[in-house]
Amino acid sequence: MTFRDLNIAEPILRAVEGEGYTNPTPIQEQAIPILLRGKDLLGVAQTGTGKTAAFGIPILHHLYRGKNGQQGKRCIKALIVTPTRELAIQIGESFTAYGKFTGLRNTVIFGGVKQGKQVKVLQNGVDILVATPGRLLDLMNQGYISFRDLEFAVLDEADQMLDMGFIHDIKKIIAKLPAKRQSLFFSATMPRDIVDLSRKILGDFERVTIKPEQATAEKVEQGVYFISKKNKPKLLVHLLQERSEDSVLVFSRTKHGANKIVKKLAQAGIRSAAIHGNKSQTARQKALGDFKDGKLKVLIATDIAARGIDVEELSLVINYDLPNVSETYVHRIGRTGRANASGIALSFCDKEERPYLRDVEKLIKQQVPRMPEHQFVDEDSDISSENLGKPDSQNNRPSRNQARSGGSKYRGGRNGNRGNRNRPRRRD
Ligand code: AMP
């Protein structure tokens, strides 16, 4: 199937093709026809599946078709609520890209920055509003936002919203939306609370489920080092020094941990920056911008801050801590490995994290290849060669074709494929 078969309005088709997309991803193939028919949608899918275009394209299509002859000030006709600023910005960029020949205008609002500029744009009139819940509710309460003409409401990453404590804000926002609307609800997982929430939002809906396996990169090579907590910084420094040309995203479970890693790396002469919720919006955008431009090679992130980060040419992801929720592992390693370039995901696992690794392996239905015994594996780490597993003894990399368990083969498509420029150096 190609985008031409989907019968989307010509200016949108032109923009999408201009982005270098030829074939719709599975979620796009399934969701776009449902949404073009005007049905509500429950999408069980995660970032990296192409879900932004899956909802963005039909919304733009309807708004474009309905726009003819419209006069007067623009009013908000589509609302997209998403948990983090980074995701909001990325969604806004996607609407701008797919809608560039439609004349439709979008804006993005989020907290952590002064509201003045955002209010001004809203007052000038927009067709599509992308927002994080807190700032949205705040500006609604101040009377800057009217949903009188709203036709589309999208709730993105609902499970993450719940984890971040946005549930009450979400309910208050929903209560203010007109009853007659098309509603879209996306969540990577569907625990009970999320099912309940979806019932409150959706009317007569159709469901599309994209299993993680469908969303995974073809070739994310994985490996795990068994190492004591104490020696993690040394191993990290060692790996980063070996791959100093590469862009590396390091995951830390906590904000405090992320700051500590930055300090340890600085002591070893490695420049890095941390992004997490305690950093100002300006600092986060600066670090992310420098990382995307290749000026900064090492970025340390917590899961929430890293959600939705779409960095081209990210060759290596390091799980400095293993996540206690195994789906998070799949999200993390999905940051690397894209259409035509394989990526590498290495994890550090200390004694306490063993159960997390077991959960991950259960989820991805495979064993993460064990990395060879390392000079940093010390006596007090309780790790014997036996439980290190069988190393890939010829080289220090995870074996190929073992990893079909995470990542997006679609990520990065928007800016075209720039090839393998930043691949990690091969040691074999
Ligand atoms: P999302 O899941 O919306 O965050 O999308 C993940 C990445 O896939 C983004 O970088 C998009 O630009 C890219 N993408 C989305 N749809 C397609 C497609 N049909 N073909 C190629 N790349 C795509």
Image (tube, rainbow, N blue to C red):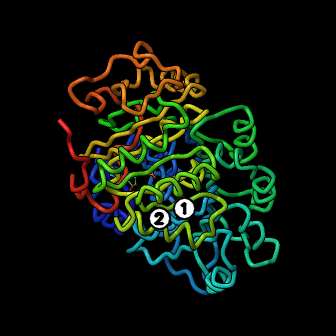
Most distant residue in the front direction: 379
Q: In which quarter of the image is residue 117?
A: bottom right
Disc 1 residue type (three-letter): Glu
Relative vertical location of residue 42 with respect to residue 139 in this rendering, above or below: above
Q: Which residue appears at 35% of the width and 55% of the height?
A: 247
Q: List the residue tagged with mark 1.
A: 86
Q: Quadrant of residue 391?
A: top left
Q: Which residue appears at 55% of the width and 66% of the height?
A: 284
Q: How crowded is mark 1: few (under 14 residues within 10 Å), some or many (20 or more)?
A: many
Please report contact status of discs 1 and 2: CB closer than 8 Å, yes or no: yes
Mark 2 CB within 8 Å of ligand 1: no
Front in this rendered view, residue 267 or 334 = 267
Most distant residue in the left direction: 428
Relative vertical location of residue 160 with respect to residue 368 in this rendering, above or below: below
Q: From this viewpoint, is residue 19 visible?
A: yes
Q: Split into 4 quadrants, where in the image is the N terminus?
A: top left
- Identify the element where label 1 is drawn: helix
Q: Residues within 10 Å of mark 2 (few under 14, many from 20)?
A: many
Front in this rendered view, residue 245 or 196 = 245
Label whose residue precedes the other's in the sequence (1 or 2):
1
Q: List the residue tagged with mark 2.
A: 288
- Identify the element where label 2 is drawn: helix
Q: Is residue 209 left or right of residue 165?
A: left
Disc 2 residue type (three-letter): Leu
Relative vertical location of residue 214 with respect to residue 161 in this rendering, above or below: above
Q: Residue 38 at what x, y percent from top left?
A: 56, 52
Q: Split into 4 quadrants, where in the image is the C terminus?
A: top left
Q: Which residue appears at 30% of the width and 66% of the height?
A: 14
Q: From this viewpoint, is residue 65 visible?
A: no
Q: Residue 343 at what x, y percent from top left?
A: 31, 43
